[in-house]
Every structure is written in C-alpha cells, then in structure tokens.
Image (tube, helix red, strand yellow):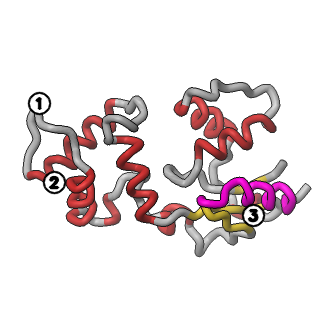
Amino acid sequence: IKFSLFLVPKIATSSLARVFIPYIKNTTYDEESHDQQHQTLWKVASRVTDIKKFQNTTSFVISRHPFTRVVSAYRNLFQIDTRIKTPMVFEFLRRDICVVARGGWKEGDPDLSFEEFVIYLIKTKVEKYNLHWQLISRVCRYAIFLYEIFIDYRCLSTGYKILFAFRKP
C-alpha cells in the first residue's frame, strides 16, 4: 500500500496507527499504549526529501475543526483526569504556559485550566505554537503537496473506507 500523509498531532494519529499498523509486515504493538502506536507508525513513516517520489502514492489529509483540536490538545496533555502520561517536556511546557497566562508559576500552584490555556494561545504568536496546537495549514503545506482525499475527522470510518477504495496499487 502506498500512501502519503502528514502525521500531525491531534488529527487522529492514534486512529491512523490502529488502521495502518496491521498492514505493515512484521509489526506489532500494544493497543493500549498510545505512545507505542505513534512510535510504531513514525518508524515506518518516510521523511519528505523529494516531492517527486510522492507522485505515485495516494495522498490524503485529515481535517479537524481548529477549536476541537485545541480542546483535544488541552485534554490530552494538561487536563488531569484525561491526560496521557506526559513526558517531562510537557510538564515544563505547562509551567511556561502558566507563566504567560498567570504571570508566574511556583511549585504547588494549581494545574493549568482550559481558560489559562486559551489566554496563553491568545497572547502567543502563532509561529511559536507547539506542534500539538499549531495551525494545520502551517504543518500540512497545502501549497506544496496536492492532496487527493480530504477526510473529515468526524467521519473517520467512512473516510478510511473511501481511502482504501481509492488507493493506487
């Protein structure tokens, strides 16, 4: 199977991993491990070095409402009852966000609220956004790559069926 896509955080990369990994030879993963799913998919993903090599592949992108993506990033990385076990880098990022939103941070301060996260986004230049909430248009390079299929995040199961039906040999 030859596909071209950009793996962008918060636009169904976990779902993509569950769909594509079974098609990758000699590859297994723990369905419960969010990190392992992503690492497995990233290991086999090609890096963009020559745009011409993508001409004989089926190219697609998954779109997601930007506000939904921001909420998902907050819940996934910062909200206590829903966040994944985050690497230390996100703990430092959480502190930096608190400094911008609150004006400071010290050990023992309350966790980052969603309102503070939004304040941080408003006060921060888009160019400095983390990849998890960076604008998809800045990451996917729509002007460079011509995508054949756009899949709406809300319709993933239907989108995957179309994608597999449309794929090039």
Magenta-span inclusion, residue 161: yes
Outermost residue to the front: 81
Report the Cα–Cα distance between label 2 and label 1. Answer: 17 Å
Q: Secondary structure at mark 1?
A: loop
Q: Nearer the viewer, residue 39 or 115?
A: 115
Q: Secondary structure at mark 3?
A: helix
User: Which residue appears at 72% of the width and 56% of the height?
Assistant: 4
User: Which residue appears at 16% of the width and 54% of the height?
Assistant: 101
Residue occupied by mark 1? 108
Q: Is residue 36 above or below residue 17?
A: above
Report the Cα–Cα distance between label 1 and label 3. Answer: 53 Å
> Predominant secondary structure in magenta?
helix
Q: Amino acid type of disc 1?
A: Gly
Residue occupied by mark 2? 100
Would you call the spot at circle 2 few (<14 residues within 10 Å), some (14-19), or many (20 or more)?
Answer: some
Would you call the spot at circle 1 few (<14 residues within 10 Å), some (14-19), or many (20 or more)?
Answer: few
Q: Nearer the viewer, residue 90 or 78?
A: 78
Q: Amino acid type of disc 2?
A: Val
Quick one: label 1 or label 3, which is nearer the N terminus? 3
Q: Amino acid type of disc 3?
A: Lys
Quick one: label 2 or label 1, which is nearer the N terminus? 2
Q: Which residues are magenta?
A: 153-167
Where residue 81 sits, quadrant-wise, is top left
